[in-house]
Image (spheres, rainbow, N blue to C red):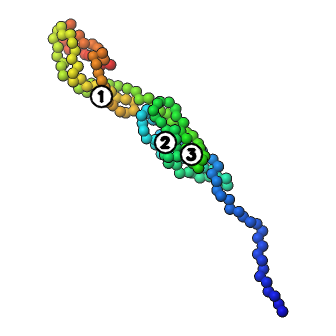
Amino acid sequence: MFHIHKKKRRTCCKHKRQNKILEKIEITKQPTKISYYVGESDLDISGLEVTGTYNDGSSKIESVTLSDISGFTTATSGEKTLTVSISGKTATFKITVNAVVLTGISVTKEPTKTSYYVGDSTLNISGLEVTGTYNDGSSKIESVTLANISGFTTATSGEKTLTVS
């Protein structure tokens, strides 16, 4: 009588599959836009590249959304540090917030009254419209008072140039 047995397979090694765990993140490319103006409300993260390094030695570019970023404020000017958080790991990058500054003015509507008699003592600026232009590209109608105007005199006749400042 014969007995036939199945051969047992021997394995030389057992491979345990490790869970891939994110160990750190780093900013590998800054966002395209890193300069903002006071009051600007939208953070632009286009161009931002964040690379994650894993416990198995691998790395990959991580997906980043606005909700992954904290610290964005343009309430005041200066350098701001923003934090990117992915799976509990963080990395930072800096932006600059610039003050909005008046860069020029122009008279966009002359005052209603532009003719005076010698000896008239009061300048009438009704209807005068002055537009201010700012370093962020914006413009707005500026408030002008008599204190902003110089050069008014009716001591002699002739054309006079007034200055608005």
Question: Which SS class for mark 1?
Answer: strand
What residue sits right under mark 1 in the picture? 141
Question: Which SS class for mark 2?
Answer: loop
Tell me the kind of residue under disc 3: Ser
Residue shown at the point (23%, 26%) measured from the top left: 109
x and y percentages locating residue 9 in the rendered image:
76, 75
Q: Give the label, 1 or 3, closer to the camera.
A: 3
Which residue is farthest right?
Answer: 1
Residue shown at the point (63%, 51%) measured from the top left: 22
x and y percentages locating residue 95 in the rendered image:
51, 36
Viewer-proximal residue, 106 or 129? Answer: 129
Mark nearer the N terminus (1 vs 3): 3
Residue shown at the point (30%, 24%) measured from the top left: 143
Instruction: Quote the CA–CA distance across marks 3 and 2.
Output: 19 Å
Q: Give the label, 2 or 1, closer to the camera.
A: 1
Instruction: Quote the CA–CA distance across marks 1 and 3.
Output: 42 Å
Left or right of 59? Residue 94 is left
Query: Is residue 94 depicted above or below 18 in this figure?
Result: above
Category of crowding for the residue at label 1, using alpha-carbon neighbours closer than 10 angstroms: few (below 14), some (14–19), many (at least 20): some
Tell me the kind of residue under disc 1: Ile
Residue shown at the point (59%, 44%) measured from the top left: 90
x and y percentages locating residue 53 in the rendered image:
63, 50
What residue sits right under mark 2 in the picture? 32
Mark nearer the N terminus (3 vs 2): 2
x and y percentages locating residue 157 in the rendered image:
18, 10
For the N terminus, the image quarter is: bottom right
Marks 3 and 2: CB-CB under 8 Å? no
